[in-house]
Image (cartoon, grey):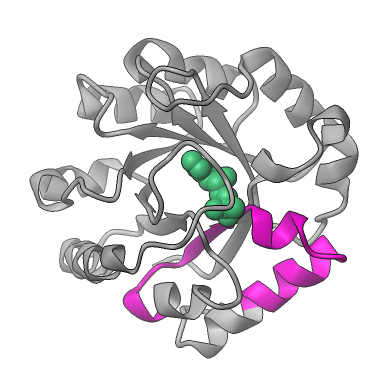
């Protein structure tokens, strides 16, 4: 089991000043980078060249969340761009086992994401191949959406599967995570928390990172 980690998403940060925006969150464990291709999701963000520049601008490791249609072909590019963790979507990957192994063999943590309506059970045997599972708590595509409580039972079931396997795989949640919702995620068994608008709409983003960490721990999280 991992310890509690907060990974602010820069999706709602100022894209014209990304280096400075990342410098505002020195207490973050990772910086969550949402890569969107306007095909897998109806939004377009940035690609490997920008991610590489961002990686050079900070000592905080990058956690890439690939919302792209062909991760089998493109995920390794984000390892080479300097990301310490690369997440592909189960719904987009053609060969998730091969892809997870490829990401790991290039030196990054391998992670697989599920949209809210995608069940974890078909992937149960694959969990030891992964360093992290990302359960989306909104439909991917945009920041600032409302947290979907309907995902909470899946978080509990995923935690039970991970514990049954006895693996160190982290369980990340992403979407609508705030001071109001993070406790429910932690109580259900999540240990890595992405927060975009909650962090970047705060007057002091780094203080919000600390508050989110405290709220998760108070809810019975794993720290
Ligand atoms: O992957 C996504 C959206 O698709 C997220 O990483 C969001 O960027 C998180 O933003 P908030 O929901 O916390 O505002
Ligand atoms: Fe994300």
Q: Nearer the viewer, residue 110 or 37?
A: 37
Q: Is residue 66 magenta?
A: no
Residue that appears at 40% across and 67% down: 190
Residue that appears at 53% across and 64% down: 177
Q: Where does the image place residue 77, in percent across and percent down from the top left?
A: 53, 14
Above or below, 86 relative to 50: below
Q: Quadrant of residue 170?
A: bottom left
Residue that appears at 23% across and 62% down: 158
Q: Where does the image place residue 70, in percent across and percent down from the top left?
A: 35, 14
Q: Is residue 219 left or right of residue 47?
A: left
Above or below, 85 relative to 165: above
Q: Where does the image place residue 69, in percent across and percent down from the top left?
A: 36, 18
Q: Is residue 187 left or right of residue 28?
A: left
Image quadrant where one finds the N terminus: bottom left
Q: Is residue 199 magenta?
A: yes
Q: Nearer the viewer, residue 206 or 55?
A: 206
**Count of numbered marks:** 0
Above or below, 139 relative to 77: below
**Residues rendered magenta in the picture:** 187-213
Q: Where does the image place residue 198, in percent across and percent down from the top left?
A: 67, 62
């Amino acid at each position: 089991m991992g310890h509690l980690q907060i990974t602010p998403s820069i999706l709602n940060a100022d894209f014209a000043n990304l280096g400075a925006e990342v410098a505002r969150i020195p207490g973050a464990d990772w910086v969550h980078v949402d890569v969107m291709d306007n095909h897998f999701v109806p939004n377009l963000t940035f690609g490997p060249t920008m991610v590489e520049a961002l990686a050079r601008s900070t000592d905080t490791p990058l956690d890439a969340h690939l919302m792209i249609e062909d991760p089998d072909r493109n995920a390794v590019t984000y390892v080479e761009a300097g990301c310490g963790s690369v997440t592909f979507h189960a719904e987009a990957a053609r060969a998730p086992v091969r892809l997870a192994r490829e990401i790991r063999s290039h030196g990054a943590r391998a992670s697989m994401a599920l949209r809210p309506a995608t069940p974890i059970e078909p992937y149960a045997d694959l969990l030891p191949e992964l360093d992290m599972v990302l359960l989306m708590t909104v439909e991917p595509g945009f920041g600032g959406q409302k947290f979907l409580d309907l995902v909470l039972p899946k978080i509990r079931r995923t935690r039970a599967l991970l514990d049954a396997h006895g693996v160190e795989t982290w369980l990340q949640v992403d979407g609508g995570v705030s001071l109001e919702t993070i406790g429910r995620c932690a109580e259900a068994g999540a240990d890595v928390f992405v927060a975009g608008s909650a962090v970047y709409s705060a007057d002091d983003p780094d203080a919000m990172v600390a508050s989110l960490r405290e709220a998760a721990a108070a809810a019975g999280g794993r720290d």
